[in-house]
Amino acid sequence: MISLCGAGPKLKLGVVTLTCLLVGILVVPMYAEAAKTTTVRVKVVMWGPRPQVLPVVDDAKNHFMGVGQRTGEAVFSDGRKAAYSNVFTFDMRRNKSLLSQGYTKMLFKDGSWICFRWNSAVVGRDENGSVSKGEGSIFQGTGPYQGIRGTAKFSSRQLPPDAKHPKGASEATAELTYTLP
């Protein structure tokens, strides 16, 4: 055993510093695991009531603001499924632009969920209507997703009304990349 009783303050400080450094190098890595990054693809089919739309006062003919909500199902590339819901607002200039922002929640069968906020813009049209692209940040989760942090990148498009999808249904494909503590 080493005794520091007769040692000067510089030697004592040096031994304490060396001890702390060794503990940090040898012991801390046993307890600290690097957060694993997970990336999954998600396909969502969603629908909902027609959004509420109001004209902007200074330009009532071409500029509108709105709010809406959608529900549906999310199917993950790793087999998980979740009930999907979102709420959103949008700023639309007829025949020029449509910007949206909102919050999405995916609720799993075990009661756990993840939530992210997002922004999107219409980037074009296809045979069924507008096509949007967006991105967001995953900021909250429960159960096995407690402490989740990550990003979402997605595109969405309208679906034609048919026997499987009500009028106004849309489809989104997303890539979620996240870490858990």
Image: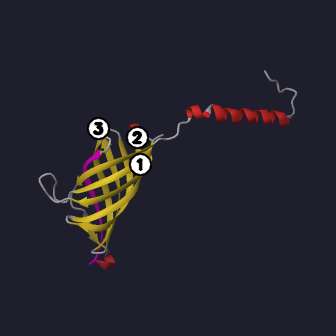
Question: What segment carries the magenta color?
Answer: 60-75
Cα separation, mark 1 vs mark 3, equals 21 Å
Cα separation, mark 2 vs mark 1, equals 13 Å
Residue at image x 26%, y 60%?
Answer: 157
Mark nearer the N terminus (2 vs 3): 3
Mark 1 vs mark 3, foreground winner is 1
Regarding mark 2 in the picture, which secondary structure is present there? helix
Q: Which residue is mark 2?
A: 145
Relative to 56, is 76 above or below?
A: above
Q: Amino acid at mark 3?
A: Lys
Cα separation, mark 2 vs mark 3, equals 13 Å
Q: Which residue is mark 1?
A: 177
Q: Position of residue 34 (x, y in %)?
A: 52, 40
In this rendered view, identify the residue nearer to me: 152 or 106.
Answer: 152
In this rendered view, identify the residue nearer to me: 117 or 120.
Answer: 120
Relative to 56, is 48 above or below?
A: above
Mark number, residue 44? none
Q: Position of residue 114 (x, y in %)?
A: 37, 45
In this rendered view, identify the residue nearer to me: 11 or 89.
Answer: 11
- Count neighbours of disc 3 (C-alpha within 10 A) and say few if under 14, some if 14 to 19, many if 20 or more: few
Q: Are marks 2 and 1 in contact (CB under 8 Å)?
A: no
Q: Which residue is mark 3?
A: 109
- Drawn side of residue 164 relative to residue 149, left or right: left
Regarding mark 3 in the picture, which secondary structure is present there? loop
The furthest residue to the left: 163
Residue at image x 15%, y 58%?
Answer: 161
Colour convention: secondary structure
Mark nearer the N terminus (2 vs 1): 2
Q: Amino acid at mark 2?
A: Tyr
* SS majority, magenta: strand
